[in-house]
Image (cartoon, rainbow, N blue to C red):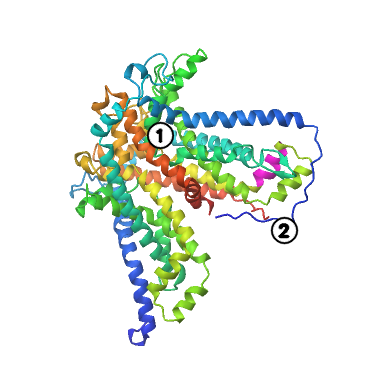
Amino acid sequence: MKTETAPAVAPVRREVRPRAGKQSAGLLGGVSHLMLLLWTILTVTPIVYTFLNSFKTNTEIFGDSPLALPQSWGWGAWGRAWETSRIGEYLINTVIVVAFSTFFTMLLGSMAAYVLSRYTFRGNRIVYTLFVSGLSIPPFLALSALYKVVDNVGLLGTHTGVVLVYIAYSLPFTVFFLTAFFKTLPTTVAEAAMMDGCGHARTFFQIMLPMARPGLISITIFNVIGQWNQYLLPIALLPGDKQDKWLITQGIANISTSAGYEADWAGLFAALSMAIIPILIVYIIFQRQIQTGLTAGVGK
Amino acid sequence: MRLGRLTPGAVRKWGFIASFLAAPLAIYIIFFVSPNLQALQLALTNSRGISPDFQYVGLDNFTRLFGDEVFWAAVRHHGLILLVMPLVTIVIALFFSFLLNLGGGQKNGQLRGVWGSSFYKVVFFFPQVLAVVIVGVLFQAVLNPQRSGILNSVLSWFGVDPVGWLIKPDLALWTIIGVMVWQGVGFYVVLFSAGMAGVPKEIFEAAALDGANRFTLFFKITLPLVWNTVQVGWVYLGIAAFDAFALVQVLSIDRGGPDNATTVLPLEIFRQTFTYYRFGYASAMGVALVFLVLTFAALTLRVTRRERIEY
């Protein structure tokens, strides 16, 4: 949420006097570009290679020139992957789970953050500390106990259970961030509304939430990506015998080991591509917001 | 507070506070606070699976833990990841973010990033958006030990024989660290870029006008000014060094292998829980992990606390 500070005085435009090190700067510039290009290649290659391999045959993939373009561009592997890997099913499951869990994380998180930031009451500090202390606890401590708890309430192997656990695990950061955010908003508008007889809840939903929009967007993106990519919780809470409930990360981890793919590498790469493409598209459209959203937490 | 003296307004206010806190608190306590507290209790028991029959065994789990070779192997691996991964990630990210924001020389007295810097930022950041699981499966293909593995086939152009990136016990963990760096750099490039954008440009320009070369500009000006952001990044990467669960589970041979050469505590906790159903022992391991993470966080915050530079 950093705004560029405008210089108080307009900088005087003048040519910088030439320096002795000009040539070395040119060389350095060349090296810099080379390094940037190298890292670009390092980043892009595994992904491009995955797409290309989905069009190849096993002999092409394991042949002498694995980096060559495919000989033909058939979509056969994509069809097979769609049917056998159940990627579509997992994608739909994940969309449903993440939609509900992010929505309720944001709703409940902003309600709690609003009350904690704007109302003085006995226990405020304790509740806030309880939420924020969750930030420093790795999820692995409670792995066994969480399994027991979810089993006890009868929600093991259900999407409802996963949604509730996602909400609980996302609340510490959401409450922490939004409490700080609500504190930065001016109080006058809400006070004026209350004077005019607007109730507490209505003030929150109709005045404060719209004002908090930038913060809400950042944390929504943060939560969507975090929950979409979550791996530990689904494999803990949606066991192997509930494969119809699985989420996308589970499915991806499974296709790389499952027997059905032993002979069909193109299919594996096609399934992997299917998992990457939606993320790639969303990223390209929203890259600015995603970068802000994901770095928002650290920047504070 | 006596109820009789409450005004209608106060009742409404208290009702509002309670109604807004009830649902989030309930979910949080049931599914987060209570499992964590139960874990502390389970760590002192011989609980196995979801069976309600277990005995308290005192600190037996911890005694066993300290005699467990795999536990110590995992702790050593976290140590190595912690030493290498944050440092390498931060150095590469600082280098790139400097180039992308200030490395393009001056134009009309204004410092700029190199040509194409916004394109690079978009590309570099992308791995951060991918699930670690996807990265793991991607790199299974990249790091395939045969000549057909993408990295090995590139190396073969230079006459290098195929390397068993993940099957050589003394190389495998370094390979995993390399993949963590691959995924993390872009995030910190963007983070440090934001830090550099927050510093008034006049500071850099004044230094450049005074004839500071790029090295001076970087080490004497840029680095001190973004030091706070670097510290925060350090803490985040350090905490990430105590995770590495998904990557090791998906990418390494035999989940933490070969022969436990890449295993990490979260993976052992998962294994004890879901393969052996030793819930008590797994929870004790969880307590050890929390202890390590909190010790790291406390030490870092103590050591790196420095005067904030005001600008």
Crowding at label 2, few (<14), some or many (≥20) Cα neighbours within 10 Å? few
Q: Measure the alpha-carbon separation of dots 1 and 2.
A: 46 Å
Instruction: Name the main secondary structure of what is drawn in magenta.
Output: helix
Subunit bearing disc 2: A
Q: Name the residue under label 2.
A: A8
The quarter in which the N terminus of chain A is drawn is bottom right
Q: What amino acid is at disc 2?
A: Ala
Q: Position of residue A219 (x, y in %)?
A: 44, 54
- Residue B297 position (above or below residue B245): below
Residue A125 in which image quadrant: bottom left
Residue at 48% x, 15% y is: B156
Left or right: residue A27 compared with residue B254: right
Residue B303: percent from left, percent from top: 58, 47
Q: Which chain carries label 1?
A: B
> On the image, numbered disc 1 is attached to which residue?
B135
**Circle 1: residue type:** Val
Question: Percent position (x, y) of residue B25?
Answer: 34, 63
Q: Does the magenta stretch include residue B218?
A: yes
- Name the quadrant containing residue A69: top left
What is the tally of numbered marks visible in this picture?
2
Q: In this view, does B115 lie to the left or right of B42?
A: right
Q: What stretch is highlighted in magenta?
A: B215-224
Of marks 1 and 2, the one in the foreground: 2
Where is residue A106 drawn, in percent x and y?
A: 38, 58
